[in-house]
Amino acid sequence: MLRSQTLDIFVCGVGGQGVMTAADVLAQAAIAHGYDCKKSEIAGLSQRGGVVTSQVRIGPHIESPVIGPGCADLLLAFELAEALRAAHQLKSGGIAMVNTIRLPPPVVSLGLYRYPDDPLGQMRAAGIRAYDIDAGAIARELGDLRLVNSVMLGAVADFLPFPAADLEAQLIERFRTRKPALLDQNRRAFAAGRQAARASRILAA
Amino acid sequence: MDPGIFDFFVRIFTFFQLFCTNNSAFLLQNCMKFLRQQPRIRRGLTSEGRMVQTAISGSATDVGHPALARAGERVLLSGNEAIARGVWEAGARLAAAYPGTPSTEILETLSLFPELYAQWSVNEKVALEVAIGASLTGARAFCAMKQVGMNVASDALMTITIPGVAGGLVIAIADDIGLSSSQNEQDSRYWGRFAHVPILEPADSQEALEMARYAFELSEAHATPVILRCTTRVCHVKARVTLGERVARDTPGFRRDPARWVVNPINAQRQLPLQAERDRQLSLVTETSALNFVTRGPDRRIGIVASGPAYLHVRDAFPNVPVLKLGLSYPVPLGLVARFAAEVDELVVVEETEPLLEQAIRAAGIRARGKDLLPSLGELTPEVLRRALGPLLGEPAASPFPYPAVTPFPRPPTLCAACPHSGMYYVLARLKKKVFISGDIGCYALGAGPPWNALDTVVAMGASMGIALGLDKARSAADRSKSIVAVIGDSTFLHMGMQGLIDIVYHQGNVTVIILDNRTTAMTGGQDNASSGRGLRKEDAPRVSFPQLVAALGVRPERIRVVDPYQLPVLARTVREETEIPEPSVVIAERPCVLSDFYHATPPYRVVEEDCTGCGNCLNVGCPAIQVIRTEQKVLKTGTATELKFTVIDPVACTGCGMCVASCGPKAIVAAAAVQADTRAAVPSACATC
């Protein structure tokens, strides 16, 4: 997958969704595989429901930690409208892996703004190759909504310059040390995410 | 499945995660884990009486945080974590800071190292003064702050640079270029020129560690404080770092020398020439410093001078162009720059925000370009550089970005479910016509946004007080009937607000001061402060009593009101009463931050669907757990159309504060566990707006 010298991944979502954690796992996996990696984040006031973005650059040697608009190879979006907001980060031919969860913020609830009807359609109409993953539904089927993060990492696992197993190993390592009881569930979530991305890929093709 | 229901579950998940992903909580966990493993550290005294500590078994990585790993290991660290490691490796004895994005994690990481004394200070000035005191003992001392923090600390900085320092003194200043969490974008490199101190600018985590360590050597070699200037793209970027050993240092102790350390006019006059001599020495050091180096490149049509992360962006954008990288960027190595300029056709200075290097270089008579090509605001990126400088290399004009930028809606940060501030803003929003509201810096600055829109001004830490007094004293005839309210949090009040309140009392300002005491410095991630009752390592500490404090400042006891912000009717009455009394008064709203461990959730509430009239008043509390589930158009008797908003409460996000109960006129909000009609009567009935 590493067409150019680097793979630039833009990760986005809403505060509390686990954007930083996902980016951390990607970075750790890249380094474990022997790549150089820089991971940059803008958290701002993320704990209070704001937009969270992280940029992960993977390659033999990384200089700048910043990707910049129009330059990302891969967009990993944890929320539907956030995918649309970050879509311009993609370079021509870039791929978007989108969790189709809708999280309307209070300004939408209050009626001050409208949540777009079909963000994914808008992205596809602009020519972006967008894969949709209903990570919430998958996680719920597996019995725990907190598994969304692992589902999304699974979804993106076959688009990386190292084997999916390396990413899974990092994820497992994280749970082994922090929450061993959740290990098996997360492994299943990762596999389900991979499967869903494959299914979406076939549909897209 | 109904997508609405699905969203509902997703929200449950999101808010659950919100409470599980607090970074500082993670740091704390690791801190506690590390402290619990203390028996693994062997303590002992050397023959000189110096305390030594040696890790005696196991790999240091198993204590959790990668910054604690053993020398020689290569780990992934953020710039902030790397600075902390470098400070520790340098053998520093003391570190002090006031939290501020993007600098906060430096001290949080330092608190994991038991060999160091580390503290949250009441503000940046005190933090720097504590570090100066430690330096006077000969110990290596460190303090950290965000860019605006140095404005507060600068009074001490501008004078300590005259006598200089004894033990190494390093000040890390983190600039928030791009203003992700700040009120301005000031360039801290100015302090080098202003205060006659050297500036080190790391570009990434490895340099952050190495420069932090070296900064102490430079500081001691020239008896000067050293500024380690970083930006968000150093502080919050994780990259690979190779760790080093901690150097053990003896501390000679404080040596009395009043002619040096008592900086009165006579001593200052005598020492100023020493400062000038130090400037001269440092201007020689910078010419040969290994931190200032040239990265060769075959394409000499341009040569670039860069510092900090800008260097990395340049390398990314123009790998074939020679670059002079300045790590010791002040004093500027003008001789080195002149020689470099002679090797290239055209010299371009690439620096973020202000053109400081460019001005110095051009003032020295070296021809250079810079801000005529590059933006003066915001972050530089490789893409920005390619577009700005590509034409100099004959590259075709950049094509537009392939996909247009779309903003579906803004997603501003919001106050948390059950945040006690939302109760206060619910009340203030209703008083808006009668009051001007002077705000301050903290989570409660979000009160400026919807649904409350209840702040008229926010400027600087503690500024709510003085601005309120000014609004009062210079009020025009048109504003005679207006009351002035100042809103400030516990940490900000202690940081810089207290002095303003003294002025309000001394000059009998007609100001109602509201102190939102949530026992936490919440905005930066929940750090403890003097009102928390505990310290950086969660040890017990004396706790400031705000009622006693403001009484001591001269507020009359009758005008000090302590209220529970969850009790909206009482809160509304109290605030209204105090704003109507024309003398200084203080309302202290006490409730812990919901993200702190002082907070204890209680059972959630729910909306009884058949009782909800769709008035939407509960939405004015601003609680993110309250969701609109459906809307309905209705024409009132007056003929005006209105939209009814029927709501639900997310039972997992709701932690049972009950503020919305008082906001609900038709009493449709009840305890989630008891929805039978007979239990509804037990719900408190007063509506704060009625």
Image (cartoon, coloured by chain):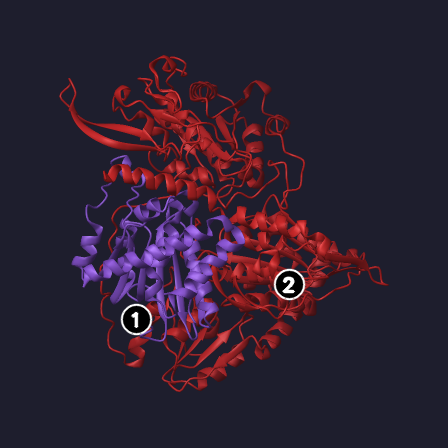
Chain colours: A purple, B red
Whichever of callouts 2 and 1 sits on the residue coming sooner in the sequence is 2
Indicate which label's residue lies in the foreground, 2 or 1: 2
Q: Which residue is mark 1?
A: B387
Please say if the residues under marks 2 and 1 sit with CB atoms less than 8 Å apart: no
* Quadrant in which the C terminus of chain A appears: bottom left
In percent of width and height, residue B355 lies at 43, 66
Q: B9 and B580: which one is in front?
A: B9
Residue at 45% in and 58% down:
A171
In percent of width and height, residue B161 lies at 65, 60
Residue at 48% in and 31% down:
B601
| Location of residue A123 by image quarter | bottom left
Residue at 31% in and 22% down:
B608
Q: How many residues crowd around disc 1 within 10 Å: few (fewer than 14), some, or many (20 or more)? A: some
Q: Which residue is mark 2?
A: B59
Residue at 58% in and 38% down:
B494
Specify the amino acid type for callout 1: Arg
Residue B60 seen: yes
Tell me the distance, in whole angstroms, between the alpha carbons under discs 2 and 1.
48 Å
Whether labels 2 and 1 share one chain = yes
In the rendered view, tell whether residue A197 sits above or below residue B17: below
Q: How many residues crowd around disc 2 within 10 Å: few (fewer than 14), some, or many (20 or more)? A: few
Residue B117 appears left or right of B461: right
Specify the amino acid type for callout 2: Ser
In percent of width and height, residue B562 lies at 54, 23
* Quadrant in which the N terminus of chain A appears: bottom left
Q: Chain of mark 2?
A: B
Q: Chain of mark 1?
A: B
